[in-house]
Amino acid sequence: MVHIVVDLEMNAIPNRYQKERLYAKMEIIQIGAIALNETYQEMDSYATYVKPQYDDKVEDFYTHLTGITTQMIGQAPCFKDAIHAFFLWIEHFDGEIEMVSWSMSDRQQIVQEACLKEYAFDTFETYVLDQWTDLQLEFDGLAFMDHRTSLADACQVAGLSLEGKLHNGLDDARNTAHLLQILRDDDLFEKTFGKVYHYQEKSRPTTIGDVIDFSQFNFDDSQKK
């Protein structure tokens, strides 16, 4: 099985497009993805900027958040071309596919934006959309978190140093891929969280606070992606 870890960056559709915003309030401006093999080792990566249709510039808020400027997306492909190329990249891998993202919001964005821009998914693309895993939900369940955890906080809890820039599509995809490897490997999970992970035993701590001293962390609630 090939695991495709994806992260999208977006720009808001201006409020003047009220009808369009009934379908989607954002437009994709970057697609980043990491392909992992069956042992969760990186074997390929994918990244592209995407030119928005309803705003001719990247708003200052999203430039500050992502580092993506209007100039960077000026010659980028439109949504239809970019998403088709992304699916073609996925299709060249042999075997079954698992799509992974931090929350389901990226899958939702693809579906909503495709509806808005009248992009019809073919049979393979529909299959890919059906193979989606919410790693945020998986992390919160395995780590017994009682709230939705940001990617940055999850990496900090797992003792991972963030690679690259937060809110860069490719960097966020790679950091998510590192978390996926830890969560799916029992030995890594044990080393990371300090307890042997057994489904059949009930001796495991009921909260991650019993395993990790959170006083050493400085969480930033403003970064919840």
Image: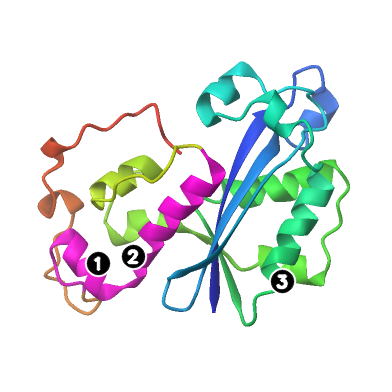
Residue 118: percent from left, percent from top: 88, 47
Does residue 60 appear in the picture of this structure? Answer: yes
- Region rendered in magenta: 168-197
The residue that appears at 36% across and 57% down in the rendered structure is 139
Mark 1 sits on what residue? Answer: 189
Question: Closer to us: mark 1 or mark 3?
Answer: 3
| Kind of residue at badge 3 | Glu
Say which amino acid is labelled 1. Answer: Phe
Q: Judge from the rendering whether residue 18 lies leftward or rightward of residue 186; answer left or right.
A: right
Mark 3 to mark 2 CA distance (whole Å): 26 Å
| Extreme-bottom residue of the structure | 95
| Residue 146 visible in this rendered orientation of the protein | no
Amino acid type for the residue under numbered disc 2: Leu
**Residue corresponding to mark 2:** 183
Q: Nearer the viewer, mark 3 or mark 2?
A: 3
> Who comes first in sequence, dot 3 or dot 2?
3
In the depicted structure, whether residue 142 falls above or below residue 198: above
At 64% across and 35% down in the image, what residue appears? 10
Distance, label 1 to label 3, CA atoms, is 31 Å
**Label 1: element kind:** helix
Q: Label 3 belongs to which residue?
A: 91
How far is disc 2 from disc 1 in space, using C-alphas? 6 Å
For residue 140, side relative to residue 112 (left or right):
left
Q: Position of residue 69 (x, y in %)?
A: 64, 26
- Residue at 50% from the left image edge and 37% from the top image edge: 167
The location of residue 212, given as percent across then percent down, is 13, 50
Among the two numbered marks 2 and 1 on one chain, the one whose residue lies closer to the N terminus: 2
